[in-house]
Image: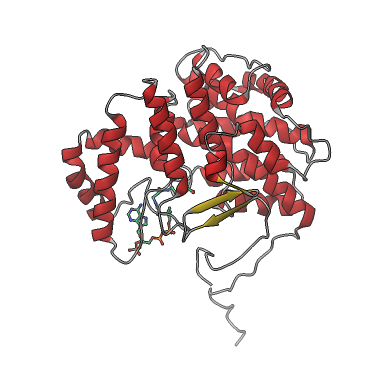
Amino acid sequence: MSDGLEDVVAAHTVMSEVDGQRGVLIIRGHSLDELAGRARFEDLASLLFSGFFDDLPSDLTAALGAARVEVFSEVAGLDTGLLDRSPIEAMRALTARLADGDDLATALRLLAAPAVFTAAVVRGQAGEAPVPPDASLPHAADILRMLRGKPATQAQIDALDTYLVTVSDHGLNASTFAARVIASTRAGLTSAVLGGISALRGPLHGGAPGPVIEMLDEIGQPANARAWIESALARGDRLMGFGHRVYRVRDPRADALKTAVRKMSEGSNVRPGRVAFAEAVEAAALAILKEHKPDRALDTNVEFYTALLLEALDFPPAAFTCVFAMGRVAGWIAHAREQVAGGRLIRPQSIYVGPQPRQAA
Ligand code: CMC
């Protein structure tokens, strides 16, 4: 067994399949190509939840809108102590105020929580008052309105929906595994989601896109890319937005998001030249990674174009992981329900390699 458990199958799931050799992602019977840019987040959450809640409405839009309004009352707990923390810590702390449970009402509150709390945290950190949710709006439209205090364009709403759908589920990634382990103890959905958020925030999982922006900003122009990347690798740093535990080819989510960023740039939401610059850095990174690790296929992952997309939507880089949580929370909830429905307590073995007690002489 390897330390990273990559050779261990720890669940049977109907949620998603990640084919790392072919670069294909299937979510509940639909390829990412069929979903990204077509489905709204509400549709995707319905798809993931289907069969795991008895009282699931055919359209979640109204119920999710009502849940946003319901959880907004917890924003009153956002004090200066929390506003001094990173956005993900503050968002997680507000989420921890929600009661645990296993029913659809709990699931909907948890689906709403990262969206409502992140918008309030980002505004609070900028010295601005929170904007209450509008239950009548679709989820992505309301997220952008709560973030900026004004309605978003349809192109921006579509881009955020594409992002949320694209990251909604992805096999047994670290945060989903954490959520399933917690759910397997019958601790409840809130506990499972809090575990998911905590696992997601690390840079090897969902914490990479903020540092992608730092990398692009430090590189500044394409001519600097090679020298910057080579010195980062010489220091032993990993390039954020590249490499993946499962994909040995390009992460299909990278292209879904690149297409969404391109669509937005047609409506001039993206800084002029930003996509071309990012592509130049990406090309340099891929060439240098090939020289650096000839035996390991390291390609672009989801986080590289996530960074460009969320930047164009006005999310601050420090809050990018919170936006990842807004999408992945649907997967965590669905996996937690699936684990409880069919799974046993997850309790693996370890091999003790420490010293034995001294024998009595
Ligand atoms: N830059 C430089 N070297 C790398 C990178 C990278 N991005 N990724 C892997 N390597 C090296 C790694 O250092 C290792 O070298 P050595 O054998 O000398 O120690 C070799 O390639 C093999 O890597 P690995 O340890 O098998 O990779 P892993 O499966 O443990 O890690 C990863 C996967 C995504 C954590 C890693 O590629 C990485 O750290 N990437 C940068 C961070 C990042 O982009 N994270 C977002 C992941 S995608 C979101 C998600 O789906 O969770």
Q: Quadrant of residue 18?
A: bottom right
Could you say where residue 273 lies in the image, as x and y percent from the top left?
27, 28
Is the residue 320 above or below the residue 250 in the image? above
Going 32% across and 36% down the picture, which residue do you hit?
214
Q: Quadrant of the C terminus?
A: bottom right
User: Residue reaching furthest bottom?
Assistant: 361
Residue 106 lies left or right of residue 312; in this view the side is right
Residue at the image point whose x is 20% and y is 34% from the top: 221
Q: Would residue 191 be seen by someone viewing this image from the given angle?
A: no
Q: Quadrant of residue 101?
A: top right
In the image, 256 versus 231, the foreground residue is: 256
Placement of the N terminus among the 4 image quadrants:
bottom right
- Tell me if residue 292 comes above or below residue 275 in the rendering: below
| Side of 10 relative to 210 (left or right) | right
Quadrant of picture, ligand 1? bottom left
Q: Quadrant of residue 220?
A: top left
Residue 231 location, x and y as percent? 20, 49
Where residue 168 appears, as percent x and y from the top left, is 58, 41
The foreground one among 208 and 288 is: 288
Left or right placement of residue 333 versus residue 80 in this view: right
Question: In percent of the image, x 58 and y 50: which residue is there?
Answer: 26
Relative to 158, say whether 201 is above or below. Answer: below
